[in-house]
Image (cartoon, grey):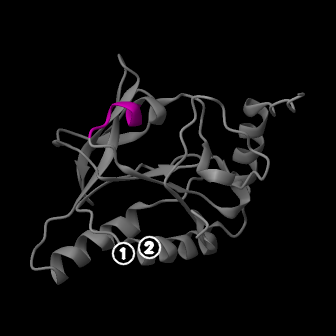
Amino acid sequence: MHTPPQPDKKALREQLLAQRMGLRNRLELSERLQSVMRMWLLRRTDTVIGAYWPIKGEFDPLPALHRWKEDGELLERQQLRRIGLPVVNKEHKTLAFHAWYPGCPTEEDAYGIPKPKDTEVIVPTLLFVPCVGYGPGGYRLGYGGGFYDRTLATLQPHPYTVGLGFAQGFIPDLLPEPHDVPLDAILNENGVVWPLD
């Protein structure tokens, strides 16, 4: 049986990044996705969430997470909620999550991305992951470095993984490769993209 050829992921990645950088209504889309994310978080009981510092036109999850942290601490009798941002381990090419808060001292990592400076390592039970693109079944197209795949293979306990991206990044014919692991959920500015129940 003939299998269709896989699309050139490098070219697809470049095309999606260019489209995302060119979004004229990014502010409106971001505000809508902030609302979707805040509503989605109401169902969760997590107290430690990992996220990312936005680059290359990515959606910024940090305002919604800061509000989640404040709301939990105000409404739930000082329940401590923590946010972690990734710090790259260059030797193993994996990510560790260090505590972050607004005003937290940061420094640039080897890729020029801000990371928390001198804060403790925390282990998220829920992990928000940026998507360059995403397709049916919860599969994600990232930047191609494999950092999240390697990290998720080692994190214990395994966190619930949620992709964040704009509707512009949906790829209806994205085919997973044998090593690809689907995300548990994907959110965009229109709501929950995956799972479809």
Q: Looking at the picture, how far across and down is residue 35, in whole percent?
A: 49, 77
Please give the name of the residue rendered at 41% of the width and 23% of the height, measured from the top-left corner.
93
Q: CA distance from mark 1 to mark 2?
A: 6 Å
Q: Looking at the picture, how far across and down is residue 74, in whole percent?
A: 17, 81
Mark 2, Cα crowd under 10 Å, few <14 / some 14-19 / many 20+, is few
For the residue labelled by badge 1, is the local secondary structure a helix, a strand or a loop? loop
Magenta range: 151-156
Tag 1–tag 2 contact (CB < 8 Å): yes
Residue nearest the viewer, comparing 62 with 159:
159
- Residue where numbered disc 2 is placed: 40
Please give the name of the residue rendered at 60% of the width and 30% of the height, measured from the top-left corner.
144
Figure quadrant of the C terminus: bottom right
Figure quadrant of the N terminus: top right
For the residue labelled by badge 2, is the local secondary structure a helix, a strand or a loop? helix
Mark 1, Cα crowd under 10 Å, few <14 / some 14-19 / many 20+, is few
Residue nearest the viewer, comparing 99 with 180:
180
**In the image, what residue type sits under mark 2?**
Trp
On residue 4, the disc is: none
- Residue where numbered disc 1 is placed: 43
Q: Is residue 145 left or right of residue 8?
A: left
Please give the name of the residue rendered at 36% of the width and 19% of the height, measured from the top-left corner.
92
Q: Looking at the picture, how far across and down is residue 129, in whole percent?
A: 47, 49
